[in-house]
Each structure stands twice: as structure tokens, then as C-alpha cells.
Image: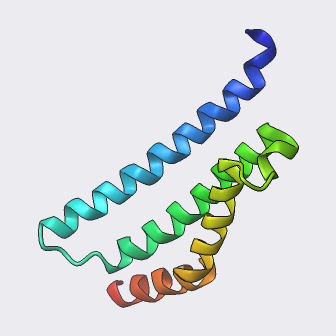
Amino acid sequence: MLMLQAIQHRVADMATGLYAARSMTYAALAALDEGREVHTEAFMCKLFVAESAFRILDEAVQIHGKEGLTQGNEIEFLFRKIRMFRVLTGTSEIQRNGIAKLLALHH
């Protein structure tokens, strides 16, 4: 059990990142359901979720080593998909630009 502690800590961090991304998304959706404008929150969610998902999948690749990048492996498939998602939904810099612009307008 002690030998796997490093992997367990990585998995714990991955699960924590997923929980944070999911919680942030649910909070923005709840605000939207209440009729509030969530433009800033939407940019923040897109940024945080995309970057968190990439970090989580990158960590999964690290844990699985070469097998994690073998074509046909689910981790490899998800890794490619999330990388494409990050570009198609707007780069992190574009999301940050949107956040900054909206924050400047509201303050």
C-alpha cells in the first residue's frame, strides 16, 4: 500500500481538480437558471474546466507511461479530444481576454 502512495496522491489531486471544475460549472448553471447573466462565469468555466481536464489527462498519461499514449487507449483518445476542445472553444488566452474585459466593464 505504501508503495502506491505517490500514485494515490496524484489520483487524489486529479479527483480534487475534477470536483472543483464540476462545482464551478454547477454554480454558473445555477446562476443561469436564476436568470442572472453569467458571461464572466462562462468564460471562467471554459478556462478552468479545459485547463483542469488537460492537467488531469496529462497526469493520467504520466501514470500510465507509454501505454497512456498508445493509440486505441482510452486515455490517449481523451487526451487528443481535450487538446482539440481547448483550441476549438477558444484558447486559454482568449478566455482570459474575455474575463478581463468583462471584469473591467463591471468595475
Q: Between residues 100 and 49, which one lies in front from this camera angle? A: 49
Residue 42 in picture, x, y percent from top left: 38, 73
Q: Quadrant of the C terminus?
A: bottom left
Indicate left or right for 42 with 52 as reference: left
Indicate left or right for 39 with 82 as reference: left
Q: Quadrant of the N terminus?
A: top right
Residue at position x 87%, y 45% in the image: 66
Residue 8 in picture, x, y percent from top left: 68, 25
Residue at position x 21%, y 65% in the image: 31
Q: Quadrant of residue 27?
A: bottom left
Q: Quadrant of residue 53?
A: bottom right
Give above or below for 18 relative to 24.
Answer: above
List the single residue furthest toward the left: 34
Residue at position x 62%, y 37% in the image: 13
**Structure colour scheme:** rainbow
Residue 6 in picture, x, y percent from top left: 77, 25
Q: Between residues 38 and 65, which one lies in front from this camera angle? A: 65
